Amino acid sequence: MEIKIKRSHCEELQEYNVDLENVTLLTLLNHIKTKIDPTLTYSHGCRSGICGSCAVRVNGREQLMCEYKPSDGDTVEPIRYATVIRDLVVDSSRVEKFNRTGLAWSETSREENISEEEMERIQTQSDCILCTSCASACPVYAVNPYFIGPFALTRVWRYVNDPREISSDAKIAAVQTNGIWDCTLCGECVPVCPQNIAPAQDIRMLRSKSGMMGYNDPTMNFGGGLDFGAPIF
Ligand code: FES
């Protein structure tokens, strides 16, 4: 099988011929690194679709290396809109930056039990493994690098939708700029999620909740220009 990989030290794709079939991309890269080219650099952890550290783009579509089975002629690149550290390894600090901007965590929760039905309502979003495939597929980053983005907004909805959370109002306020209204609802984030989460739908829910709290889509404010707010980097 021939596979082409984007390396950080050259413009051209590097081709490797590997005599392996029906293996994951991670197994194939491990073979290349141990038998052919020890300089090839990529990241992985759990090898079972849990840690989210092995996301790359294959033929222009985000995949987890530990789950994707490559085919002859595949092209592998790092995920988009993240600084490449080396080859297929990108700077993952944006995960913390975007989660921090959106207050995408449980800050203070009421000490109360949660029903099974309420737990089910937040289970899907709780399954996010922060692989950032959704952010790589999101076209908004091409025009707004400060966009809080799909994975962080999904996590915001997870906590806003949790009846134990007492800081929901602050979270809704935090996603008004560079957040829910910047999303085009194109849905590119949905099919690339390995956990079957639909961030675009969660963003719709955040918009609805925002509307109920008196917020409006700022792009409907005729006469104003685009305002990306303060940089978070
Ligand atoms: Fe952990 Fe792939 S190595 S998700």
Image (spheres, grey):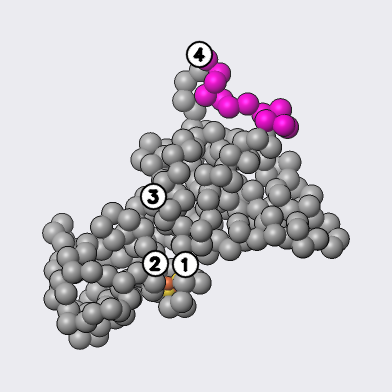
Would you say residue 85 is visible in this rendering?
Answer: no
Residue 55 percent across, percent down from the top left: 39, 64
On screen, residue 194 versus residue 217, left or right, reads left
If you read the primary sequence from the N terminus, does the residue marked by circle 3 or circle 1 appear first? 1
Q: Is mark 2 within 8 Å of ligand 1?
A: yes
Q: Is mark 1 within 8 Å of ligand 1?
A: yes
SS state under label 3: helix
The residue type indicated by label 1 comes to: Gly
The residue pinned by badge 4 equals 223
The residue pinned by badge 3 equals 137
Disc marking residue 52: 1
Write the residue at 58% across / 39% down: 204
SS state under label 4: loop
Disc 1 to disc 4: CB gap under 8 Å: no
The residue type indicated by label 4 comes to: Gly
The residue pinned by badge 2 equals 64
SS state under label 2: strand
If you read the primary sequence from the N terminus, does the residue marked by circle 1 or circle 2 appear first? 1
Image quarter of the N terminus: bottom left
Disc 1 to disc 2: CB gap under 8 Å: yes
The span picked out in magenta is: 211-223
- Crowd tier of the residue under label 4, counting other residues whose Cα lies within 10 Å: few below 14, some 14–19, many 20 or above: few
Disc 2 to disc 4: CB gap under 8 Å: no
Of badges 1 and 4, nearer the viewer stands: 1
In the depicted structure, whether residue 203 falls above or below residue 100: above
Of residues 209 and 54, the one nearer the viewer is 209
In the depicted structure, whether residue 33 falls above or below residue 43: below
- Spatial distance from mark 3 to mark 4, Cα to Cα? 31 Å
Of residues 224 and 136, the one nearer the viewer is 136
